[in-house]
Structures are given as structure tokens and as C-alpha cells.
Amino acid sequence: MSVSSPRIVIIGAGSLVFSSRLTADLLSYEALSCGHFALVDVDEERLDLAGQIVARILAEGDYGDASYSLHQSRPEALIDADFVIISILVGGFDAIEKEIDIPKSYGVCQAIGDTLTPGGIMRCLRTLPVQSAIARDVDAISPGAYVLNYTNPMSMLCWGMYEAVPDLNLVGLCHSVQGTTSEWARRLGHTIDEINFQCAGINHQAWITRFEHEGEDLLPDIRAFAEKKDEWQKDTSRMEYVKHFGFPVTEMAGHNSEYSPWFRKNEMLVERYCPGGSWNGGPGFIKELYDRPNWRKQMKKMATWETPVNLQRSAEYGSQIVHAIVSGEKEIIYGNVRNDGLIDNLPAGACVEVPCLVDRSGIQPMKVGHLPEHLAAINRNQINVQRLAVKASQEADPEIVFQAMAMDPLTASVLTLDEIRAMTRELLDAHAGFLPVEFQGKNLADKPLLYKV
């Protein structure tokens, strides 16, 4: 690695916001202001606009020694890479619309469907082959490079990438730990800098098991807070977790509501836990998140600085990790890594979210030990689905896809096995054009509907 000029490869650089935000974060550190940014995207127009935005960031921030290059060829970009940052979307809005609408026609109402649920499983099937190919390219072209994954479904993809390349320097990154802990600090009248906390579990379902201010345990205050009606209504399903299970969980209430069997069985419950129409699986909400028909206009505004990119560093972990490894200045971040004895009562090899020390020696996950057993049990319900989804992708086996769907907590709370099989078949048929060739010609077996006899 060149400490003076690290090569940072951003795969999926044509995204509307992500690559520009990440670039600005990285350049905010003086130690990284001489870096080279290799931008990679399969869409030539988006890639060109991303390059224009980065060029404007370099000019506006006066980062005179930084540079960038544009690549549609991933192997070319990976030569001499020090860091590889991934944020891709395979299949686009067309695939996402199908994996939301088809389950909803069966009564499975997802909030966003990018982590678990039928949507997360289908997204794994079409994305993991690409991510595993990226992992193998990194291993072959730039072994030793650090891979930072931002793509969902986070746990499934990181698990599959580790199995594709066991020695990969991989960490999955999300902002839910930062967001949730800061939110609880604010609610209790503090800033997060004043709080000593520990959080561990799995992505989008990690548990805050320690939350202290000057040695005082604040978990009792959090439990009392969750029973205030007005505050409960602002965070519904997450407050239910605190109220009944005793510990705060990461991710927003809408996301949280689709990871369990308790909150989305019918329209009445969706309205109770996701009031006002947000996070309710509605077509307008999903389209706004993913379709973004005005992306071209918005990117041009960013490139001309009509809509300037904020050059102040955000709370995302990506830039902190790169800076800590390059500079040697220690950071503690929360990352998604392989469970090599980190959480004793979660399955070995699964992808877990734990604190990690980062310095010039790299990313060093920290052992947590045991989670409270009931919290680990909730995590294991998700991990069961993740394991089957990864296996279904690796073996391109429709029957294992069905098995993953059948184990999904939300799906199982609403549908019979016969209905899950029918829904899975319809999803696979609708995604035929998005799935890898290994799935072509394979059909999910029919089973007799014996209850009709």
C-alpha cells in the first residue's frame, strides 16, 4: 500500500449519492487527500457523470494532489488497489418491484425487502454471484486489498463472499449502529460522545447491551422511555422490542417490523406499526427509493455545483476505516464480519455485527462473548434464512430458495407452505431475466394440494 497515495476503487460509482458522499468523506482527511479514486460502473453515462462530480469535488475542496479515473472494466480498475468499496444494485427497480408486488399479492407486506423477507432472498440470488466474482477478482488481482461492502442484503452477501474467498479482507458496513446509538443518546439528553456503549448481533438487528453515561447504566432509563405512549408511537416496533425484550435494537421501526412475525400480519397491524403510510410496502415508497427517474438531472446539478456536495465528513464508517489503516490512528467501528468465535451463541461462520479495532494492522474484530439468550434466538431466526439463501445462490437450487422463503419469519406468519411454494415459483419465473444462467431451465417442483382432496 502506498501510504502517500492509496488507490481506492469504488464499484457502483454511478449511484446518485453514494460515491460522491464517500469521496467527500475520504478527502476530508489530510492523509487521504493525495489518493487516487478508480470509479467503476457498468453504465457509461452514469460513470461519466460520476467522474464529473468527483472532478468538481476535487476542485471545490482544493484537493490538488488527488486524482481519479473511470473504468467499465473491473479488472483494470483493481490493479494495485489498496481499498475496494462496493455499492451495487443488480436488476434495478424492475426486479425490486416484482419482489415487492408478488409477495404482497399473497398477503406478505414488506417494508422494503432488502435484508430478509422474499425481497432480500431474491436480491441475494441475483447479487451474490456478482459480489463473489468481485471477491475472486480482488483475490487474483490485488490480494491483500481491503474490501468494504455497502451492498444489501449485507449479511447474506458477506457470508457468501467469505465462502468464495476465505482469506478476503472483508468488512460489511452500515450506518444503523451510529444512527441508533446517537438517537438514544439524544433522547436521554446526552451526545453520543458522552456514552460508553456496546452493540452486537447481526446487521439491522444488533442489540445495545451496554449504554452508560459516566459509569451510570442507562438501560433502565431506555426501558422506561419505551413505555411512554407518545415516544412509543414515534418508533413503534423498535419500542416493542425494548418493552418486551429489554434491549434496544438497531435499524428503523419500519425495517425492524419486517424481520419478525409480530408486526405485519395484516393491513391493520401495518397501519399500527407503520402509521402514515411510510414503510408500508406501498408502490410509491419503493419507487421513490429505487426508481429515481430524475437521476440524470440531479447528477448534472451536482456536477455543476447547482446542488453542491457537502464536503463535511459524514458519520459513515468507510472513510474512518481507510484513514485508520493509512494513518495508523486508531478507530473503533462496528462492522459485519465472519463469526470466528466473536459471538459464542450465534453460529460459527455466520456474518455478525461487532465492534472492530482499526489501525495500520487492519480491521480487527473484537470478541463479544454471549448475547442474552433470547436476543441470540431472535438473531438465529434470521441467520437460518440467510444460510439457506446463500446456499440456494451457490447451488442455484429452486428447492432451497423455497426452503429459505418458508423459514422467513414474516412469510411464515402469513402463508401456508403450499402458498409459499406457489409464491416462490412465481418469483423465480418473474426473475428469470435477472438470475444467473445456472438457474435457467430449473423449475421448483409442484406438490399436490392435499387439503383439497
Image (cartoon, grey):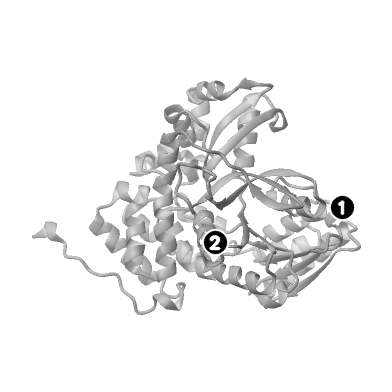
Q: Is residue 100 left or right of residue 20?
A: left
Mark 1, mark 2: which one is toward the viewer? 2
The residue at the point 69 percent across, 32 percent down is 192
Alpha carbon of mark 1 to alpha carbon of mark 2: how far? 32 Å
Q: Earlier in the sequence, mark 1 or mark 2?
A: 1
Q: Is residue 44 left or right of residue 240?
A: right
Residue 8 percent across, percent down from the top left? 75, 64
Relative to the observer, which residue lies in front, 343 or 402?
343
Q: Is residue 15 left or right of residue 118?
A: right
Give the residue furthest to the front: 341
The residue at the point 45 percent across, 27 percent down is 243
Q: Quadrant of the C terminus?
A: bottom left
- Asked if the residue under mark 2 is in contact with the one under mark 1, i.e. CB atoms within 8 Å, the reply is no
Residue 388 percent across, percent down from the top left? 39, 59
The residue at the point 37 percent across, 65 percent down is 427
Judging from the image, what secondary structure is the residue with disc 1 in? Answer: helix
Relative to the observer, which residue lies in front, 256 or 445?
445
Residue 42 percent across, percent down from the top left? 63, 74
Give amino acid for label 1.
Glu
Give amino acid for label 2.
Tyr
Give the residue furthest to the left: 453
Q: How many marks?
A: 2
Relative to the observer, which residue lies in front, 436 or 360?
360
Residue 30: mark: 1
Q: Label 2: which residue?
A: 162
Q: Quadrant of the N terminus?
A: bottom right
Quadrant in the picture for residue 198: top right
Residue 284 percent across, percent down from the top left? 50, 54
Q: Is residue 184 above or below residue 92?
A: above
Using the rendered image of the protein, determine whether residue 265 is visible from the camera's viewpoint. yes
Characterize the local packing of mark 2: few (<14), some (14-19) or many (20 or more) Cα atoms within 10 angstroms: many
Using the rendered image of the protein, determine whether residue 17 is visible from the camera's viewpoint. no
